[in-house]
Image: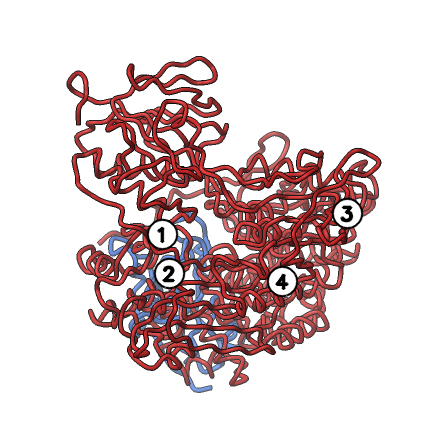
Chain colours: A red, B blue
């Protein structure tokens, strides 16, 4: 490299999109001697984010930001580069900065192509590429008075993503494609037609093969109509252009670098422009006469340049443009060359909505390409065989016969095309670094970290390697049961087991412990086996459940009556105050909108609860792995901004799920508008009101590992909302591990929230009726645990201080005053009475 | 119910604390004997054990409220506070070999009563 000075060299990267980000990360990882001092200059005010997932940012609130670079990298955002002085090796920015370079990388990306039609500049016309585009679209749509129509111009990959966004914004969505079928670059006519059926089944209208004449304004001067060449028109108050991309090559043009006829900065196989100090990568580059719009090839170019900057000789030799995406539940995949002139084998199932086509060489042995619509499960395997010999007949390949057991794939097969990771690379990483978890493999090899479509294949390779190495990860609950909690749940449910003794005698060994006993108690309770202190079940309960209260550090208990939705009458509030005063309890408001009374001795609990039950209170199950609270904001009844009655919904949900035992505690909240005052997105199930119903968020968590809940479904009516929550809870209760919150449970589900949607909404497992029935049984069987306990002398027997002196209070329990209330005093230090051997 | 001695007597001074049927199977109860809190446990097979009720890890008198079970065949109780497990026969903490809690002789007499003996 011809550079001035010694020590470090100055690298300037223009553009901080995914490709620019990848270039910097790749360089920093390899440049261990810190040869390059890196400055990145980005036009957007945000640092790099995952543009590919833009729509899920809208529909699921996904956080798209890429991890920050190390602090030695200088990142200048919101300041576009306006000129390059190649003689001086200096770039100039909009704010007047001048930054010198020894090497320069153009990673300027592309801009959406807007065809030159009349009306393209009207208010209400958008493009769809950046978070700012998305925010503008969202703000404009939200300000429209009533539900209206929106149109996406462009029925390709990006256009359909934009259509998903429009539908997510609640618009009646139209897709206009000038070609005769959808996704014409990736799909053949049959695949395009099948995709159209799926899209239309999702209540989107497809207008294909009709040229657009222009956009017309309404009386308000904003866009109101899309007009076609044949004289027809559709009403549309929002229009999004997503009809292809144009490389952002204006900086290169401005400094005299050669560009292609149809745009794109001309680079050689090392991604170098005509100026040896300047490279171009990603969508702005024209390499081998082609501009690449997919993230995989763009990342490959970034890797090539990182290598070249460190004197390597890497080349970019074209790229696999295979694609798989999931559009609102519809799998679409295209791989290899689906348009090759050779033999093809086609399968169409109009009932299931499945279309598959494989293109094979004339001898039907070599796979050249193909298209999958409606079922793309075999995509990772098929793509891996492109250009190679199929292990069986094309039919077997079509119907999953080649679903290779990961171990069989040839070593050179590229498993992750986004990051160019081969099967051998994955296998070596697993062996050399003794990896046993999928997350570790992803972290070490980057395989599956971009589009994720190869993750099932990576998992299979991992499983095959682990099996070959004789490693088996134990799922056993404890020494007494060789089963996981979910396996035990199924055993108990299917065999109708109702006692721990029967379960451990027939399926375990020994006599249980503090791990398996409460877990089994929870399973028995979830399946509705009466009061948790009935018969043998009582002995299984943890001390909190055993005394229906929460043990505190000095052996006393706290008491939490249920206050559904946080709504309470003054009279009841006074009762709580009186009880706390009369029993001398420390009183604190909880985070879940209720009141916790501390310092009750075991022998006081029945008397305290007698007073509370008589005043109409019920157990709040603060002591159980069960539903805790459903918080709410005040909602539309009082709040100027509320759009739904969040309090009524919170109460309804809390009363429905109270007493439901689960693998761990469950928290919920309902917000009456998008301001989200109830913090529903940090809950196991959170509900946020919309103008048209409720948005449901699942598997959030506060606590030690906070996690925002994922948006599961939008604009639900009351009944659908409740059914979805019913199924979510029952499916979680059935399948989660012991003490696994819904957040980590969802993260452990293969397929994540999409899979959950298939189970709950599409009933893919055929389980919904069973889950619904289970919840209906729970609701019908609910009874207040404390009221039942007070009515049963046998259950009350346990609430004594001493079995031989029931009227003597425990002398070890002492309090001292603090801020006008009590606080516990531990009489003995932890060492006292310990016999040390 | 036949008379049986579950722990050899080390003292002649036995204190009656409760009826055998007052103890729940696979659960503990606390007795106050001469000012000492004694946790008495009845395991699934009807055996009786007695430990100090004092949990050395938390400094609270709570061992009687722990969950009973077995570890490698040994009868155990897990402290309800921080879940350390103790061998009911010896008081040895199985999660920290430095820690042992006192044990007391306990028996179930022919009248169906439970008695403990303090040194």
For mark 2, what is the residue? A454
For mark 3, what is the residue? A691
Q: What label does residue A125 carry, if any?
A: none
Of callouts 4 and 1, the N-terminal one: 4
Q: Position of residue A552 (x, y in %)?
A: 52, 48
Of callouts 4 and 2, the N-terminal one: 4
Location of residue A571 (image quadrant): top right
Q: Chain of mark 2?
A: A
Assess whether mark 4 and mark 3 are in contact (beta carbons under 8 angstroms): no
Location of residue A144 (image quadrant): top right
Estimate how packed mark 1 is, as few (under 14), some (14 to 19) or many (20 or more) residues with alpha carbons within 10 Å. many
> Of the residues tagged 1 and 3, which is closer to the observer?
1
Assess whether mark 2 and mark 1 are in contact (beta carbons under 8 angstroms): yes
Question: What is the distance, in whole Å, between disc 3 and disc 2 at their CAs?
Answer: 39 Å
Q: Residue at x 70, y 62 (%)?
A: A722
> Of the residues tagged 4 and 2, which is closer to the observer?
4
For mark 1, what is the residue? A418
Answer yes or no: are tags 1 and 2 on the same subunit: yes
Q: Chain of mark 3?
A: A
């Amino acid at each position: 490299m011809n550079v001035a000075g010694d020590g470090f060299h100055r690298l300037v990267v223009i553009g901080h999109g995914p490709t620019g980000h990848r270039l910097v990360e790749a360089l920093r990882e390899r440049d261990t001697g810190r040869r390059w001092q890196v400055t990145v200059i980005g036009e957007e005010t945000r640092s790099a984010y995952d543009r590919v997932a833009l729509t899920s940012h809208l529909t699921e609130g996904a956080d798209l930001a890429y991890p920050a670079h190390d602090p030695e990298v200088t990142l200048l955002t919101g300041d576009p580069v306006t000129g390059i002085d190649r003689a001086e090796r200096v770039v100039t920015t909009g704010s007047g900065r001048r930054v010198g370079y020894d090497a320069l990388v153009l990673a300027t990306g592309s801009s959406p192509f807007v065809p030159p039609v009349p009306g393209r500049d009207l208010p209400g016309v958008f493009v769809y590429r950046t978070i700012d585009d998305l925010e503008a679209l969202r703000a404009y749509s939200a300000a429209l008075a009533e539900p209206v129509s929106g149109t996406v111009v462009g029925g390709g990959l990006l256009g359909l993503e934009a259509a998903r966004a429009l539908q997510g914004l609640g618009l009646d969505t139209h897709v206009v494609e000038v070609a005769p079928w959808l996704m014409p670059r990736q799909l053949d006519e049959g695949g395009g037609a099948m995709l159209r059926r799926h899209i239309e089944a999702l209540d989107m209208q497809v207008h294909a093969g009709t040229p657009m004449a222009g956009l017309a304004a309404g009386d308000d001067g904003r866009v109101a109509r899309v007009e076609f060449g044949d004289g027809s028109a559709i009403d549309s108050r929002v229009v999004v252009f997503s009809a292809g991309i144009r490389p952002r090559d204006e900086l290169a043009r401005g400094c005299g670098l050669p560009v292609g006829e149809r745009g794109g900065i001309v680079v050689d196989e090392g991604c170098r422009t005509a100026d040896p100090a300047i490279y171009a990568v990603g969508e702005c580059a024209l390499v081998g006469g082609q501009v690449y719009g997919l993230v995989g090839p763009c990342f490959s170019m970034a890797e090539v340049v990182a290598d070249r900057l460190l004197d390597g000789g890497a080349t970019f030799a074209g790229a696999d443009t295979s694609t798989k995406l999931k559009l609102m539940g519809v799998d679409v995949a295209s791989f290899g060359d689906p348009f090759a002139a050779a033999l093809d084998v086609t399968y169409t199932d109009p009932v299931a909505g499945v279309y598959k086509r494989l293109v094979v060489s004339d001898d039907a042995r070599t796979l050249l390409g193909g298209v999958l619509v409606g079922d793309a499960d075999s995509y990772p395997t098929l793509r891996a065989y492109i250009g190679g010999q199929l292990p069986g007949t094309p039919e077997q390949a079509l119907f999953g016969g080649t679903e290779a057991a990961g171990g069989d794939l040839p070593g050179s097969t590229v498993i992750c095309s986004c990051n160019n990771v081969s099967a051998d690379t994955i296998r070596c990483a697993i062996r050399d670094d003794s990896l046993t978890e999928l997350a570790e493999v992803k972290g070490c090899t980057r395989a599956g970290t971009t589009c994720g479509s190869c993750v099932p294949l990576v998992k299979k390779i991992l499983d095959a390697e682990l099996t070959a190495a004789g490693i088996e990860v134990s799922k056993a609950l404890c020494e007494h049961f060789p089963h996981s909690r979910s396996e035990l749940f199924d055993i108990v449910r299917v065999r109708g087991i109702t006692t721990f003794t029967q379960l451990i005698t027939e399926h375990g060994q020994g006599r249980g412990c503090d791990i398996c006993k409460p877990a089994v108690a929870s399973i028995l309770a979830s399946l509705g086996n009466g009061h948790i202190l009935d018969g043998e079940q009582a002995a299984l309960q943890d001390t909190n459940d055993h005394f229906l209260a929460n043990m505190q550090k000095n052996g006393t208990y706290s008491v939490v009556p249920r206050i559904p939705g946080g709504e309470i009458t003054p009279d009841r509030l006074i009762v709580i105050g009186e009880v706390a005063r009369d029993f001398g309890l420390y009183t604190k408001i909880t985070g879940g909108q209720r009141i916790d009374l501390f310092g009750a001795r075991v022998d006081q609990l029945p008397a305290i609860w007698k007073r509370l039950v008589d005043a109409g209170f019920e157990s709040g199950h603060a002591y159980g792995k069960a539903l805790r609270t459903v918080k709410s904001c005040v909602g539309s009844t009082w709040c100027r901004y509320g759009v739904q009655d969040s309090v009524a919904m919170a109460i309804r949900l809390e009363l429905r799920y109270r007493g439901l035992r689960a693998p761990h505690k469950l928290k919920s909240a309902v917000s009456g508008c998008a301001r989200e005052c109830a913090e529903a997105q940090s809950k196991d199930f959170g509900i946020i009101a919309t103008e048209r119903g409720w948005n449901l968020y699942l598997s959030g968590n506060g606590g030690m590992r906070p996690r925002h809940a994922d948006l599961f479904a939008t604009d639900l009516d009351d009944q659908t909302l409740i059914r979805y929550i019913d199924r979510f809870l029952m499916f979680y209760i059935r399948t989660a591990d012991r003490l696994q919150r819904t957040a980590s449970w969802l993260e452990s589900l293969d397929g994540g929230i999409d899979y959950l949607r298939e189970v709950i909404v599409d009933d893919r497992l055929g389980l919904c009726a069973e889950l619904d029935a289970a919840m209906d049984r729970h609701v019908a069987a609910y009874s207040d645990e404390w009221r039942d306990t007070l009515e049963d002398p046998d259950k009350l027997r346990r609430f004594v201080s001493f079995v031989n002196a029931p009227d003597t209070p425990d002398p070890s329990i002492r309090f001292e005053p603090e801020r006008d209330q009590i606080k516990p005093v531990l009489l003995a230090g932890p060492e006292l009475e310990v016999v040390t051997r | 119910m036949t008379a049986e001695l579950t722990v050899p007597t080390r003292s002649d001074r036995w204190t009656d604390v409760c009826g055998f049927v007052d103890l729940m199977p696979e659960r503990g109860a606390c007795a106050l004997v001469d000012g000492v809190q004694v946790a008495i446990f009845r395991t699934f097979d009807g055996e009786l054990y007695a430990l100090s009720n004092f949990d050395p890890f938390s400094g609270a008198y709570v061992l009687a409220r722990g969950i009973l079970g077995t570890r490698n065949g040994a009868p155990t109780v897990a402290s309800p506070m921080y879940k350390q497990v103790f061998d009911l026969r010896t008081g040895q903490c199985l999660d920290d070999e430095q820690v042992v809690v006192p044990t007391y002789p306990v028996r179930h007499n022919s009248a169906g009563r439970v008695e403990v003996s303090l040194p």
